[in-house]
Amino acid sequence: MTHSEYLNANKDKFLNELLDLLRIPSVSADSKFAEDVKKTADFVAEKLKEAGADNVEICPTAGHPIVYGEKIIDASLPTVLVYGHYDVQPADPLDLWHSPPFEPVIKQTEEHPEGAIYARGACDDKGQMYMHVKAFESMMRTNSLTCNVKFMIEGEEEVGSANLGTFIKANKEKLKADVVLVSDTSMIANDTPSIDVGLRGLAYMEVELVGPNRDLHSGVYGGAVANPATILCQMIASLHDENNHITIPGFYDDVIVVSDADRTEMAKAPFSLDAYKKDLNIDDVWGEKSYSTVERTSIRPTLEVNGIWGGYIGEGSKTVLPSKANAKISMRLVPGQNSHKISDLFKAHFEKIAPASVKVKVTPHHGGEPVLTPTDSIEFQAASKAMFQTFGKNPIPTRGGGSIPIIALFEAELGIKSLLMGFGLDSDALHSPNEKYGLFNYYKGIETIPYFYQFYSELKK
Ligand code: BES
Ligand code: MN
Ligand code: MN
């Protein structure tokens, strides 16, 4: 039996196991779910053992545990380190889900005529991570594993992977490998495979403005005392100029400019602005002047407000001049930029533009560095061949807009490059209500991964 025959014979089992995994609400950001996060780690560890992994461990950290397992078949063969995450983003706002986030259902959609699984984490990253466990099982049962493999599945990716950084620094020998294989990114479309060759970095900040020492009557004091909510809006609005360039001095200084030739090459990848607008139900797009939508979400840095609050937001009305206003603001970074430097620039600028009528506090949260992965490597070639085998088309190299902060550390600490072979779609509603993952994508991933191992070991000889 070949691995694809094994997959075909086990489709229902593979699906049902993923549905069970999706039923455990492993929200890493919310301590209410800490027990469920643990249960999810147990589940993953158990399935790795069943699939045939040795030395399966649940490694405690200062936060959520890391699941490790390995199969070393021959020290002379290449070693693949599979990285993924079993934690998920919070599911709220709950009322916007058409079915409960942790009770997966399968429905057909235009993009997923073969059906898609709706659940938090379906695509990001339980569905994509679990493909690797099932691909491994398929190779083990059909005696076709051609590389050594190590699994490192973490539970804190969605909160910045701080403890994984510590773990990899302390376990360099154990994690030795030739390549890190990751499925936690998107491809262009189900009939247009692509491989991410870049990820953006991230600098995440929280700001607080304090005006008067207490909430005030907005009639008695309004117009004479600075309203922190108004000031915050003005300050935030000033962070982009009329061309939607970011105004923080020095922000673009280190950006490595992408050549015109590379931009022309990138622009050849299929992209429909109409379909994009239709999917989001917007009449127009927005962004930095002189760049396309694809460029704005890949090769250019950005600044976004992720949350903003202050004053009265309860039922009805309350005439109040709030004492405080707050916002969470994050910046996506591109190669050349450094998250610490950008955090410092933001802090200095935001403090500087605050008028004397308010006090300002800027607190940096997590960050991560941007990455670029090579396309002229054996890893990329092997992945291309694998995707050609199962999609009948060569994958297009693309640069992803999201961030996986640990990827830069794999290279810095372990000296290993990553291969970002994602099978999700940007429209799968990651981090949004009604997240989904296509059955086509799930099975295609399980089918493609073993070919990567096969071609990788052949090309490495
Ligand atoms: N899997 C995503 C990152 C991603 C998604 C990359 C799609 C490329 C395409 C990951 O789980 C994620 O959401 N990362 C966070 C960063 C983290 C520090 C919270 C992000 O990008 O916001
Ligand atoms: Mn992810
Ligand atoms: Mn995510």
Image (cartoon, rainbow, N blue to C red):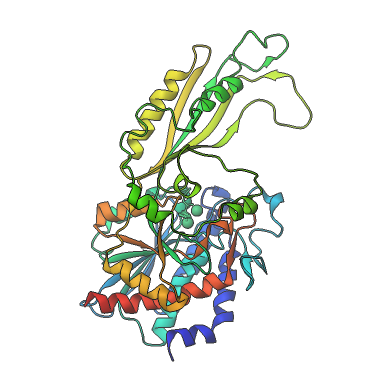
Question: From this viewpoint, is residue 72 visible?
Answer: no
Above or below 303: residue 225: above
Name the residue: 30% across, 56% down.
410
* Nearer to the camera, 444 or 55: 444
Pick out the residue farthest to the right: 316
With respect to residue 232, does 223 lie above or below? above
Q: Quadrant of the N terminus?
A: bottom left
**Left or right of residue 380: residue 45:** right
Q: Quadrant of the C terminus?
A: bottom left
Residue 338 left/right relative to 226: left
Residue 285 drawn at (x, y percent): 58, 43
The answer, for residue 189, to whether it is visible in the render is: yes
Residue at 32% of width from left, 47% of height from top?
259
> Which residue is at the far bottom?
1
Q: Return the x and y of residue 57 as percentages of the image width and height.
A: 38, 67
Between 89 and 292, the residue placed more toward the observer is 292
How many marks the image carries: the answer is 0
Task: Tell me which residue sits at (60%, 53%) in the image.
Answer: 274
x then y, percent, for residue 292:
48, 46
Which residue is pictured at 44% across the width and 69% down the height? 45
Q: In the displayed structure, does residue 386 sit left or right of residue 189?
A: left
Image coordinates of residue 433 in percent, x first then y, are: 64, 53
Q: Taking 120 as reference, is 303 above or below it?
A: above
